[in-house]
Amino acid sequence: MSNKLTATQRKGYNTILNLTDEELIGTLRLEPVKTKKNSTTGTMYKNCQSERFVAALCDPRTSYEFKSKEIFEIVEPQNVEYKKFTIKLTLKSHPTSALSKDDIKNIKAYIDWCEKQHHLEIFMQPDLNISDVTSYLNKVGSLKSDKEIDDDVSKINLERIPRVFIRIKTPEFFRCFHQLLNIYSNSLLNSSHYAQFKLIGKVFQRQRSNFISIEGTIPHRNCAYFFKPSKSSSKYLINSEYLKTYSSTFKKTDLGISSSNLQKKFYSIYDMDCPNDKINIKKNADKLPEEDSLPPFSNIE
């Protein structure tokens, strides 16, 4: 929560967090957020424990060759197609009478002030839709943020491409989105609500380096995703020219901060058949051919 909130906005934020399911459904609704037309701007999602990794990745003073040998590795494949679906919390025109007028006024003050604070972005592979994501959330019950995933699972997932990649500006509102998706997911299935994107690449910090050490962080907790609107069949690659477009990120990074809470804003789903904090180890015992029985030993008389 921002420290810049007024007293009224802060009350609105706290009221949203404390809504019962019934009050939530009667007070707020979901509204699609459309991607700007003709937008070609790419976005880097910093899913990392330390922004120092991002600074090293985008540092214009070092060569791409140095970065690729000492700082990061690229997960294959690149240029993976995704659909982006963005929604936001909006106050209903006629909210429930269960809340006081002051509560409604406070909620409106908060939502009107910080629009992007209550946005949820969902990137999903082309064969999925928002109904599939909602069904998955209902099945697993509770989704873990990438920060909450244990080290063993995190290490395995690091070199995989997620089926679904979720970013939320205010993680405390994830429950609200989940509950409201059960009400609105069918009405949000219209294809016009989806934007076509490409995952240009996912990069993660190398486990070892001869020349660089990012203190206060664990390498497998640092990765970045590069998404770009899919306006043509053009393919992009993570290379020297592409990273140069993010040089300004280096200047904006506070190198004095050793760790951040960015990971808690991301939820990655790698397998739709198991919780996102587990690895799906498929049992294929019934598919394996039965071993031939061993020949009996000869009786030696």
Image: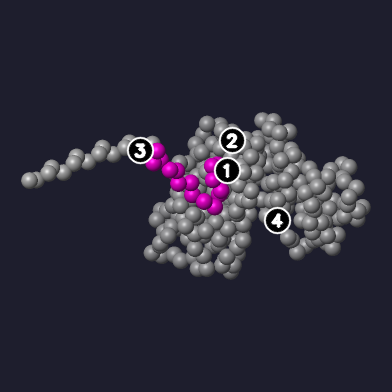
Image location of residue 201, percent across then percent down: 50, 45
Q: Does the stretch in magenta take in 197?
A: no
Mark 3 residue type = Leu
Classed neighbour count for the residue bearing mark 1: other residues with Cα under 10 Å, few (<14), some (14–19), many (≥20): many
**Which residue is drawn at the image coordinates 60% and 63% (left, top)?**
260
Image location of residue 161, percent across then percent down: 50, 44
Mark 4 vs mark 3, CA separation in Å:
46 Å
Determine whether the residue tagged by mark 1 lies in a helix, strand or loop.
strand
Residue that carries the numbered disc 2 in the rendered image: 128
Total residue callouts: 4
**Which residue is drawn at the image coordinates 9% and 45% (left, top)?**
300
Residue that carries the numbered disc 3 in the rendered image: 288
Mark 2 residue type = Leu
Q: Main secondary structure of the magenta part?
A: loop
**Which residue is drawn at the image coordinates 74% and 43% (left, top)?**
180
Q: Is residue 117 above or below residue 128?
A: below
**Which residue is drawn at the image coordinates 45% and 49% (left, top)?**
159
Question: Quick one: label 3 or label 1, which is nearer the N terminus?
Answer: 1
Image location of residue 130, percent across then percent down: 65, 37
In depth, the one of 98 and 286 nearer the eye is 286
Mark 4 vs mark 1, CA separation in Å:
20 Å
Q: Is residue 134 left or right of residue 157?
A: right
- Numbered badge on residue 164: 1
Q: From the image, state whether disc 3 or disc 1 is nearer to you.
A: 3
Determine whether the residue tagged by mark 3 lies in a helix, strand or loop.
loop
Mark 1 residue type = Val
Residue that carries the numbered disc 4 in the rendered image: 172
Mark 2 vs mark 1, CA separation in Å:
9 Å
Mark 3 vs mark 1, CA separation in Å:
31 Å
